[in-house]
Amino acid sequence: MDNTTRPVTKYKTGRAGIIFILGMLMTISPFAIDMYLPAFSKIAEDFHTTTARVSLSITSYFFGFAFGQLIYGPLLDRFGRKKPLYVGIVIYILCCAGCMVSHSVGMLVGFRFIQALGGCVAGVAAMTMARDFFPVEESAKIFSLLILILGLSPLLAPTLGGFITAGLGWQWVFIGLMLLAVLVMTIVIMFLPTGYQPDPTISLRAKPMINSFLSILRNKQFYTYTLSASFSFATLLVYVAGSSLIFMEIYHVSPQLFGGIFALLSVGFIGGNQVNILLLKRYKSEDLFRLALISQLVLAIIFLIGAVYGWWGLAGTIVMFFLLLSTIGLIYPNGSALALAPFTTSVGTASALLGFLQIGIGGVASSCVGLFNSTDMVPILAIEVMISIAANLILQLSPGRIKK
């Protein structure tokens, strides 16, 4: 079965079209996370609970997103990319309706978990198909371009969610998510070519699947860059989980202003990705990855110290988060490209394992915001520092680094 990368010039949609469609696929789950953030206060009021407790619905989405990828990875290799994608998106759409009629935090948390089990297929399929359509040496650049499109989510979703919540109620946010998923799936059906043929030799039995995951995890380069990047990426998920608390509860901004701040801060993450494209013309991915990790740790420590001593007001907090997210914008595409580079077969399974570890580790870290019922910024920043230390230690101590 020939599943090697084919030149994108062979497809009618073309290079730019394929990148755009894959990027749109990657926006499904981020929109599901970001669009209802401004509604946290209203949801908490309706459910008679706290904003921190409502943030557990983000954590449950992270866990569903993580575990679902382990399911879809082998399915994408066995049945091709599109059939599992369609099934997952339908599950996602149905659970949007479930979230809309929820009347308690527990019910919302449960539906969000199942919603993520379906929606996660879009992200892992997009990452996998990026390897189907483009050569490995372009991976870091392609991932950066995908994240440029992914940036539509934090730029638009919170602001849109704030206006929808204020005008129509938070339930309508989930109607908007349903419509977005239908639109993206329609574009995929009509315009995305097939770059991979199903491989019936891929086993879906538990033991071969587990052995396949273990085989991938034993690759030193994979586990080094995956684990290091996953701990780094967890700082982003901790920020997302705590952002409503920090800006709406501590600094008392309105839902509409919160959406604007969230959009502004997302420019840091997106900007880091686009700077990465330029830097890759002169520097290696592994060098950029290492320097960005160190920068992230230094910034996180300064941010924490300043919070303890009361250096930051609203403006200072925004600036520090902007810088911190910029480093993640450099780390994420390079880490993903370096982790997947060793594989030419079972790319879907490898992408799924990569996504599982990234979101799983981030989900555990972000759960501290809700479980500890944080009311102050210092514990959130302390979590950021600890996981940044872990990311740097993994890279420095692991034998799986690419040697110069």
Image: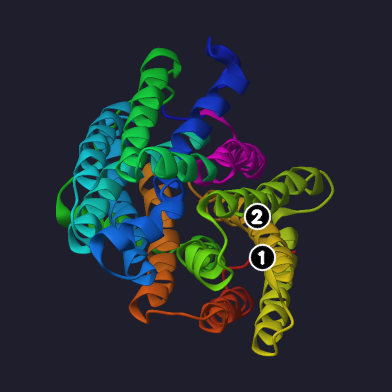
**Residue in the image at 72% along x and 48% along y:** 271
149 in the magenta segment: yes
Q: Along the horizontal axis of the image, is 230 left or right of 181?
A: right
Which residue is under mark 1? 321
Q: Are marks 1 and 2 in contact (CB under 8 Å)?
A: yes
Q: Quadrant of the C terminus?
A: bottom right
Residue 134 — which label?
Answer: none
Q: How many marks?
A: 2
Which residue is under mark 2? 265
Q: Disc 1 to disc 2, how far (Cα)? A: 7 Å
Quarter of the image for residue 50 reads: bottom left
Q: Position of residue 240 (x, y in %)?
A: 50, 61
Q: Position of residue 325 (x, y in %)?
A: 65, 60
Amino acid under disc 2: Leu
- Crowding around mark 2 (Cα neighbors within 10 Å: few <14, some 14 to 19, many 20+) is many
**Residue in the image at 39% along x and 58% along y:** 40
Q: Secondary structure at mark 1?
A: helix
